[in-house]
Amino acid sequence: MQEIGISDIHTHTMYSGFTNYKFLSFPDSVTTPRTSIKVAEKMGLGALCITDHNTIKGALVAQKFNKDIVVIGEEISSNEGEILGLFLQEQVEPGLSAEETIEQIHSQDGIAVAPHPYSGHCSCVGTKTNTLKFDGIEVFNSLHRDGYSNALALKNCNGHAKLGGSDAHASFMIGNGYTLFNGSSQEDFRTAIKNRQTIHGGEVASLKDFVKYSARVAFESSKTIMKFNGVDCPMSARISRVRNSRKMSYLLGSVVYAFSPLPVICTLLGDRVLQHKGRRVWKEQHDRYL
């Protein structure tokens, strides 16, 4: 009986930089590459795709700990929506058209994937999945709790490989979404995508996961301010440029947030907003695409 491998095609580390929401700016992820590898090894993943925003540095660092399972990836900000590049040799620059971005991925024998293509809150390519030369579509993204965007992606996959990913921004989210393939190696995984012989699965991230993520970001930020983690990443680089007087106010704010009801309150409010956006996308696109 042939072995079945498990992959998570979409994960982030602390090299993903910052997320901006209105007047707020916060680390996209505070997970170290080493922690991602430990979780993947414990789960028995055959392939872990590190897909930080517009950089492959996190994946390169992760390869030092386990080259056999780490797939070098990048979530690239094209000017027409985000695109995942897997099995990359070098970074693909952001800001290109979607077509040019895919060409850059394929020029290094990489795999081009459309992540969360019908998202109501992430930059996405939408209906361009029908015309662009994608190798696979992320038809299940565990961060999208609304259910609508995943349903639209699955209905409009149009013969591409169907893939699942966690879009993990914290280590405990890794594997929430996954892709099954015949075999166990990275090359088996690549072949399965090319031959459209993949199966997606998983469950949406729980509200508890989001509460933990929110509190973890604040707590790890305070450690970086105090220089306790010693990791060279975008968060530490930004904090190093802040005046010491402001660092103390940031430190106090991070500690108060992490150990208060605020992560719960913010998560519940954020979930309501995203559910509303998801329903709006569904209403706008249901008749056209379903």
Image (cartoon, grey):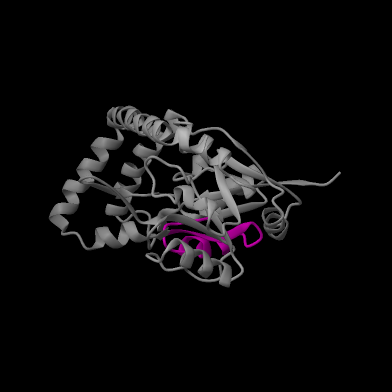
Q: Residue at x 64, y 56 (%)?
A: 69
41 in the magenta segment: no
Q: Height in image: 231 above or below 284?
A: below
Pick the front one: 185 or 61: 185
Residue 239 location in percent, x, y?
25, 58
Residue 217 location in percent, x, y?
35, 44
Locate residue 273 relative to residue 34 in the image: left or right: left
Residue 149 location in percent, x, y?
47, 37
60 in the magenta segment: yes
Q: Residue at x 16, y 47 (%)?
A: 249
Label tally: 0
Does residue 35 appear in this view? Answer: no
Q: Quadrant of residue 54?
A: bottom left
Locate residue 198 relative to residue 248 in the image: left or right: right
Q: Residue at x 63, y 62 (%)?
A: 67
Residue, far right? 1
Does residue 41 appear in this view? Answer: yes
Residue 237 location in percent, x, y?
30, 62
Q: Which residues are magenta?
A: 50-76
Considering the image in quadrants, where does the N terminus appear?
A: top right
Q: Height in image: 156 above or below 282?
A: below
Residue, far left? 245
